[in-house]
Image (tube, rainbow, N blue to C red):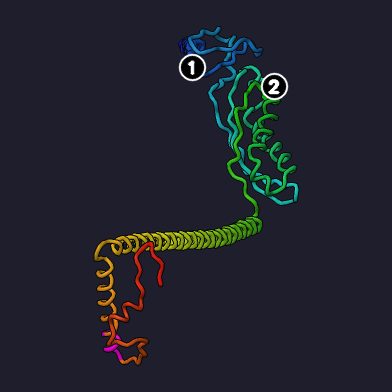
């Protein structure tokens, strides 16, 4: 019997020794970076352990909460919301938050992640209820900013900071989605028709302007050609007149020289005979105004006179 009590005492003391060893090792805490440990002493908040080595008092101090200070994401599950024009849409999102005050995050709210998710859902429903369906797709930034603003005010009590809120999906009912797709298709067709008509209009304008420029250029070319031809003819007439005047002056000068009159009479006789021969070779009937047998008298009838003398 005595041996039984001795074994029992040894077992109890061994168990107590193991508990002491366990508590001793549990009192040594190594806090990693971006973490915070909340320590309570006899059930009351004592201190916050920052990253590093810490030793606690066994059986007195206890680590109650272990908080991660890194930025974390909280998924907001899909929920049904009604827009201002009473269209039901399904919205889900994600919140990016981080703990800035471990004490408030531990004692200010039971579960700050769940609380932030619930507040984000209610705020999203409130904001979407003030917008029409078409604007809900355009005002995602407005919805996100409003949710962040509300969460920031609550986060001051909860010891958290809300960095941003993003809407992942915003889905209307299938019937509304089909109607919106038809509306978008109709709008695209209208824009295509307008663009095509504007292109045809511009094409016709360009064609008419091109034809107008062509006619103007052609008329200017014709006008310039006519001017050039007129100037050429005038130059030709002027040159012929000058040549004729010079020829007459030379003939008059030749007549005044000794033997000049006889030379002129000879040239006239030659030209006269060539002309008569040409008339004789043709079938045309002519009436000669003079006696061809008296050729010398015919030439005398021309009454050639020297320059500076009057004709008889």
- Tell me if mark 1 has few (under 14), some (14-19) or many (20+) residues whose alpha carbon lies within 10 angstroms of its own: few
Was residue 281 drawn as part of the magenta stretch in this picture? yes
Q: Which is more toward the observer, 267 or 209?
A: 267
Is residue 295 shown left or right of residue 220? left
Q: Earlier in the sequence, mark 1 or mark 2?
A: 1
Q: Main secondary structure of the magenta part?
A: helix
Q: Which is more toward the observer, 174 or 58?
A: 174
Q: Which is more toward the observer, 302 or 186?
A: 302
- Residue at screen point 35% across, 78% down: 301
Query: Where 175 falls versus 112 (above or below)?
Result: below
From the top left corner, tell me how far across and down residue 212 is, in percent: 53, 61
> What's drawn in magenta, residue-wise?
277-282
Is residue 125 shown left or right of residue 19? right
Mark 1 sits on what residue?
A: 33
Mark 2 sits on what residue?
A: 157
> Separation of disc 1 and disc 2 at Cα?
24 Å
Was residue 186 drawn as part of the magenta stretch in this picture? no
Q: Secondary structure at mark 2?
A: helix
- Residue at screen point 29% across, 89% down: 282
- Tell me if mark 2 has few (under 14), some (14-19) or many (20+) residues whose alpha carbon lies within 10 angstroms of its own: some
């Amino acid at each position: 019997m005595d041996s039984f009590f001795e074994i029992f005492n040894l077992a109890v003391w061994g168990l107590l020794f193991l508990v002491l060893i366990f508590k001793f090792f549990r009192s040594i805490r190594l806090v990693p970076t971006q973490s915070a440990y909340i320590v309570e002493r006899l059930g009351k908040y004592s201190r916050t352990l920052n990253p590093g080595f810490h030793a606690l008092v066994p059986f007195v101090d206890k680590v109650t909460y272990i908080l991660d200070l890194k930025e974390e994401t909280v998924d907001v599950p899909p929920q049904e919301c009604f827009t201002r024009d009473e269209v039901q849409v399904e919205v889900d999102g994600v919140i990016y938050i981080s703990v800035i005050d471990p004490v408030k995050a531990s004692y200010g709210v039971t579960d700050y992640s769940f609380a932030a998710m619930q507040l984000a859902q209610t705020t999203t429903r409130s904001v979407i209820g003030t917008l029409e369906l078409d604007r809900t797709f355009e005002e995602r930034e407005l919805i996100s900013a409003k949710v962040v603003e509300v969460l920031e005010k609550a986060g001051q009590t909860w010891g958290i900071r809300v960095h941003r809120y993003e809407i992942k999906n915003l889905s209307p009912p299938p019937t509304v989605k089909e109607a919106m797709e038809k509306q978008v298709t109709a709008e695209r067709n209208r824009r295509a028709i307008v663009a095509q008509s504007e292109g045809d209009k511009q094409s016709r304008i360009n064609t008419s302007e091109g034809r107008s420029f062509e006619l103007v250029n052609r008329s200017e070319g014709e006008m310039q050609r006519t001017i050039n031809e007129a100037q050429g003819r005038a130059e030709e007439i002027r040159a012929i007149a000058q040549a004729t005047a010079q020829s007459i002056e030379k003939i008059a000068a030749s007549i005044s020289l000794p033997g000049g009159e006889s030379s002129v009479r000879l040239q006239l006789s030659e030209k006269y005979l060539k002309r008569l021969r040409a008339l004789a070779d043709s079938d045309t009937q002519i009436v000669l105004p003079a006696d061809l047998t008296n050729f010398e008298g015919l030439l005398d009838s021309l009454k050639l006179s020297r320059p500076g003398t009057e004709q008889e």
